[in-house]
Image: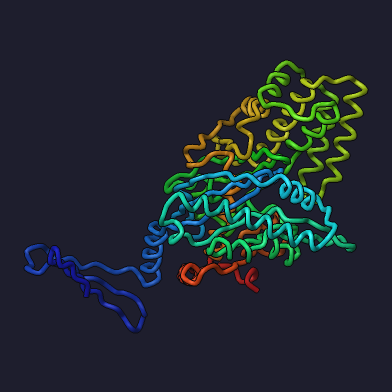
Amino acid sequence: MLRDSSHGEFRIRFYDLASHGWQFEICGDRDLSRPQKCFPMRNQSEFVQLIDRYRLGEAKRLVLGIAFKPDFSAVGTSMLLTQGRGKCLRPIWIEYREALITPGVASACLRFSNGQVSDICELVQLRNDVSIQLAAAARRAMAISDSSEKKLLAICVDDPGIWLRDFDGVIGWEPLVSAATLSEQVGSCVIDGLPLRDVAGGGKGWPLEPLAWWLMFADRGRKIADTGRILVYWSDVCRFCWIPESDGIDNEIPAIRHAAVHGARLEAALLREMGIETIDPRERDRLGAQGKIHTSLHEILIKAIDIQSRNWHPLDRKNENEIVTTSLQIIREQRISVGDLLITLAESTASYLKFFIDLCRTQQARIEVVAGGSLDRHGLVSSAIGRIKGVAWSDPQDFNYQPACLESVSASMMGMMHIDQMPLTIPELTGSPIPRVAGRLTPGNLAGFRRLIMEMGDTSPPVMKLRDAV
């Protein structure tokens, strides 16, 4: 019997031991002045689902994500407040900060990330130095609120790491960050090592972000979801991610697609060969606006993109070097100007994006483009994408984020997925046999670790098909 003392209302529920379910409920008030109501109860499982749905909507949790900039010159930190659990997880508030990395540490990280590992002692020292600087950045981010340290569940680090390939061609990954040092310095629990479980299970360990991006940007309208979105992440490598619309009644894994094409690294390499070490974004846009698309170079870039995008991996730098060599030969033979090169590179990216959209397009007519990375600072690529018919730009304010903080916010979301025991890997993208929960947990102080364990223990992992669980 449930009683509401403020209004004198009562409810009596009858439970059938034979069928193990709630049969009916009688509602009334103390003085019987209002009419009585008797109606059938939902079965027990439906009742639990209603309670779970209420809890999913009310739960608000705080995590901190840390991610490196592509050149390791700085790290981005995002304090993220989320609502819901599992597939109902949604970001509702983001506070972003950047912290510089000392030049010596940044150059060592860049060298090691390119596979130039010379001494294990140097790697151990580098991990310690990097972790201390990340700890300082985390403390500055946590200083936003005096109570954030007490409410913070964990720090999730998206570590680019060191990608290696052994003599048998098997992919391996080693971290650049020491989770134990970071946890000791800050006192919070740390989630890192995201690629390790996928690599151990036979996958490539990359890409890992698409499912987190789907949670961030998918159209999950309660009644009608009719907007498919394309995330265009412009960085050293330009990445396209198809984020299908969903109303929540979707398959176990959404039909996400991903492709990687040439980006800022190829552009910088070609400009460097033409005698330009660095170029201001405004000057780049001005030169590109004066140039013309060169047909021969455009065709070569499109062919290279088609080959590169299928199974690209951070280890595959050899293909990029071949593109640079082939492109330089045409540039020198036909005396292509800097402006022609820049506009041709931008148009080739937009051309493949159009092909990617046509490949992913469903019956729904509405498609939006979400900017990520430094795309908002590259006017040539943004303009070329804007000329694609039937595609509209989404407003970042609709998602409470800015393109520059995508890396660290993605790290926060992936950490929250680890807390909810939600699989992060997508077999069609990483090549692993089954979806796996990614990341490893390093405990922090006793109170924070206890709070995190209670949060994880209160979360039910998603239901898996029997063949996937075996």
**Furthest residue toward bottom:** 18
**Residue at left offset 18%, top offset 70%:** 3
Left or right: 284, with 393 as reference point: right
Image location (x, y in percent) of residue 216: 53, 48
Nearest the camera: 90 or 164?
164
> What's the residue at 49%, 72% (across, down)?
446
Q: Nearer the viewer, residue 200 or 183?
A: 183
Residue 347 makes an appearance in the image: no
Q: Residue at x 46, y 54 (%)?
A: 82
Is residue 67 in view from this perspective?
Answer: yes
Please tell me whether residue 94 is drawn above or below residue 397 in the rendered image.
below
The quarter of the image holding the N terminus is bottom left
Quadrant where the C terminus is found in the figure = bottom right
Colouring convention used in this rendered image of the protein: rainbow
Q: Is residue 16 above or below residue 113?
A: below
Vertical comparison of 453 with 291: above or below: below
Give residue 460's position: percent from left, percent from top: 49, 69
- In the displayed structure image, the side of residue 332 where residue 48 appears, left or right: left
Task: Indicate the position of residue 120 as horizontal and vertical percent values.
Answer: 81, 63
